[in-house]
Image: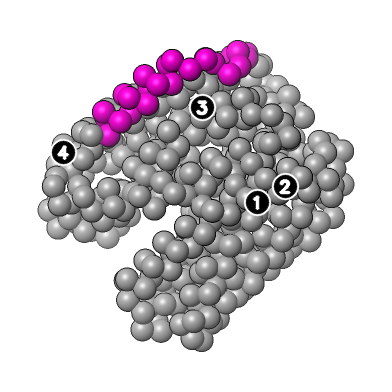
Amino acid sequence: MIFFDVAFFSAIAPLLPDYVSALGLSKAEAGVLSASYAAGTLVFALPAGLLSARIGPRRTVIAGLILLGCSSVAFGFADQFLLLDASRFAQGVSGAMIWAGALTWLIAAAPSDRRGAVIGTALGTAVAGALLGPALGALAAEIGTETVFSGVLGVSLALALIAARLPESEMPERQNLREVADTILSRPIVTGTVFVAIPSVMFGAVEVLAPLQIAGLGGGHALIAAGFIAGAALEAVLAPIAGGYSDRAGRRKPYVAGLAVCAIAMVAVAVGGTMGVVMAGVMLTSLGGGICFTPALTMLSERAESSRLHQGFAAGLSNVAWAAGQVFGGLAGGGIASASGNAAPGIAIAALLCCTAAYSFYALAPAAVPATQGEG
């Protein structure tokens, strides 16, 4: 479910030029269309967590799959800008429901001593789905969006039927909303959410800075795409490995090590004077992200459990942290780069990563223990 959800999210890229040409969209309107999915996910991230807590993860996932299929059909047949935006936003809402429900379902069904490996596998699966998405978009551009996105409905319904035959992993819980809000705003949960957001800031900035640097050194679209595809493949492989290692050695080691690698990568991307250095920086961002992102998600899940916060809300907070970090990194990186060049935002984000690594090394326990015991 997670694989196909992310694949359909990333399928928009090859279609944007066609929509710009056919509908006369401006660059700003194309950006709105591209961001509508993430906006839907961000807006509905916490409500999806609440839904998972109230009706259970299985029903949340099934509802998300049905919404994904119906909104995809609407997107495939849409020929107006507002209808495309609305259906894309609805796809994002369905993505929030699928992620919150599926991740909650996985965590509840998995042994606690394998939580990192399970979350890493889910994350690796999501990254693998992102690799398939552009191919689906290219296919839709060739044979028609109506055919391809109508097929999404068939896949979604098939997955929903399979999900309906599986047993619910846990009974729905009714948590007082005031208590939920207080817990979400507590220090362990806020800190855990920030631990997820910091690597997301880096990824948002890299998606802006790396293409600018590569293009400035004479690289073309194919080279840019190759770098990001290779990096995503590396991250998909590393995520479950890092999760399994963190189950054995604790979350601190891989998280701090991954942040350190990311800091080096940001400097290489931002100030690299040769194509080889910049491309190495792109690969290193995926290496560092593959090492640190899974422990960050696992820590947030464990902090939610120790604070008696339903895992659906933890999944929702991870969506909020990812989307907010991506948006902030992209806007800040692009804005500062426009004003003062690529070096300034790259070095600033590298400093942010180093500060987070230093704090994490101090605050986190060396072994996997509850957050309330391991945070200083």
Expressed as whole percent of the image width and height from the top left, the position of residue 337 reads 48, 73
**Neighbours of disc 1 within 10 Å: few (<14), some (14-19), many (20+):** many
Q: Is residue 82 visible?
A: no
Residue, disc 2 = 246
Callout 4 secondary element: helix
Q: How far apart are marks 3 and 4 (CA)?
A: 28 Å
Residue displayed at 20% across by 47% down: 140
Mark 2 and mark 4 in contact? Answer it, CB < 8 Å: no
Q: Tell which circle, 3 or 2, labels the residue nearer the N-terminal end.
A: 3
**Neighbours of disc 2 within 10 Å: few (<14), some (14-19), many (20+):** many
Residue, disc 3 = 101
Residue displayed at 14% across by 45% down: 144
Mark 1 and mark 2 in contact? Answer it, CB < 8 Å: yes
Of 288 and 175, the residue lying toward us: 288
Query: Can you name the residue that lies furthest to the bottom here?
Result: 273
Q: Tell which circle, 3 or 4, labels the residue nearer the N-terminal end.
A: 3
> Is residue 164 magenta-colored?
yes
- The disc labelled 2 sits on which kind of residue? Ser
